[in-house]
Amino acid sequence: MNTEVEESISVLETDWRLLLKNAVRTVEDLSRKLGFESLPSQWYEARDFPIRVPEPYLSRIKKKDLTDPLLLQVVPHVAESRQVVGFSPDPLLESKSMIGQGVLQKYQGRVLLITTSACAVNCRYCFRRSFPYAENVVAPSSTSLGSIESDSSIKEVILSGGDPLILSDKQLGRLFEQLDSIKHLDRIRIHTRLPVVIPQRVTAGLRELLRGLSKKVIFVLHFNHPAEIDSEVSLALKMLADDKHILLNQSVLLKGVNDSPEVLASLSEKLFESRVLPYYLNMLDRVEGTAHFEVSEQQAVRIYRKLQAQLSGYLVPKLVREIPGAKSKELQPLQLSRSTKGTSPF
Ligand SMILES: *Cc1c(COP(=O)(O)O)cnc(C)c1O
Ligand code: SF4
């Protein structure tokens, strides 16, 4: 083994649970760690959805820069408490799609499991901030899985949450065992941000668990900005790719974070270098407290067209929006910018 690889592996061996436990949990602490002399006035202590930033993610945030795109994703801003028309606690009507405790089905052939309500990071734009996940987690004894066992049209199970990789290897192992024994299932998909915020989560033990599955494993990661990919993250992704899992990425289009074709193009290129393909670029879900992140449809389409014009087709994610009751994520209509030509403010 060459020394470069050896050194990177030892870096990744820091215990991920310790990193999780020691995450920054107050804006005071964050302010101090980022070198601000006093607490920035636009930040506040959000008690209902508190700040949570683990060190590996914190280390990628620029010091003393209030506009850092990684910082904006994790720090509670006073704008969150503003009431804005059209923004509500459960815009996706998730609570209407439960087919069992912790089991959501909206689309044909696949179901989503809410494996936990916890995440390694609290992203300010997330719908999780107001959905009552805690009461809706899949039961550990898992009578919930009965609804999957009895429906052979379900080919894919999506582990979501919260973040499924916050579960211990033991808990995951139990869940995997149950899923692996369901004959008609072909694929297990893992929607996770853990390798982004704490790449140390990709341990030898987790890799072994995943390699032991008879089903195909697909990761849908969640990167929003190229600065989220450092050498440790890249190494963790390459390990998963070496294990022959399929790696995809979804982003949310966020004002001040990645609302530029240059940033998104650079994200796609960096993902590809780490063997991840772009999958979705999501329009923001209109959840209460997130209006300051919204990019208008016209602006989104304008950014997207520029992105398309500079990348190979396979590096362009699909621009989608989730509409309650729809049979799939809906493509954002791209003729929008043309039909508004002349009246467009851009
Ligand atoms: C987004 C989502 C999926 C996955 O949709 P894909 O288009 O297959 O990625 C599945 N189930 C639910 C409930 C979802 O919200
Ligand atoms: S579910 Fe994903 S986007 Fe939401 S807070 Fe957790 S990691 Fe962030």
Image: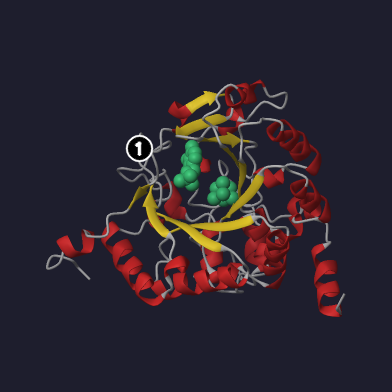
Residue at image location 46% in from the left, 54% down from the top: 78
The answer to whether residue 66 of the structure is visible from this angle is: no
Q: What is the tally of numbered marks visible in this picture?
A: 1
Q: Observer-nearest residue: 211 or 272? A: 211
Tell me the quadrant of the picture where the C terminus can be found.
bottom left
Quadrant hosting residue 344: bottom left
Q: Can you give x and y, in whole percent of width and height, for residue 308 in the image?
A: 36, 70
Disc 1 secondary structure class: loop
Determine the residue positioned at 78% across, 55% down.
Answer: 16
Q: Residue furthest bottom?
A: 3
- The answer to whether any part of residue 156 appears in the image is yes
Read off the residue under disc 1: 326
Which x, y percent locates residue 57? 66, 63
Amino acid type shown at disc 1 = Ala
Q: Residue at x 66, y 50 (%)?
A: 120
Query: Quick check: 304 above or below 193?
Result: below
Q: Is residue 96 above or below residue 58?
A: above
Q: How is the image coloured?
A: secondary structure
**Eyeballing the image, is 219 above or below 70?**
above
Local packing at callout 1 (Cα closer than 10 Å; few below 14, some 14-19, many 20+) is few
| Residue 249: % across, % down | 54, 58
Placement of 179 over or under 49, stated as above or below: above
Residue shown at 39% from the left, 42% from the top: 328
Q: Position of residue 43 (x, y in %)?
A: 52, 58
Quarter of the image with the N terminus is bottom right
Left or right of 214? Residue 310 is: left
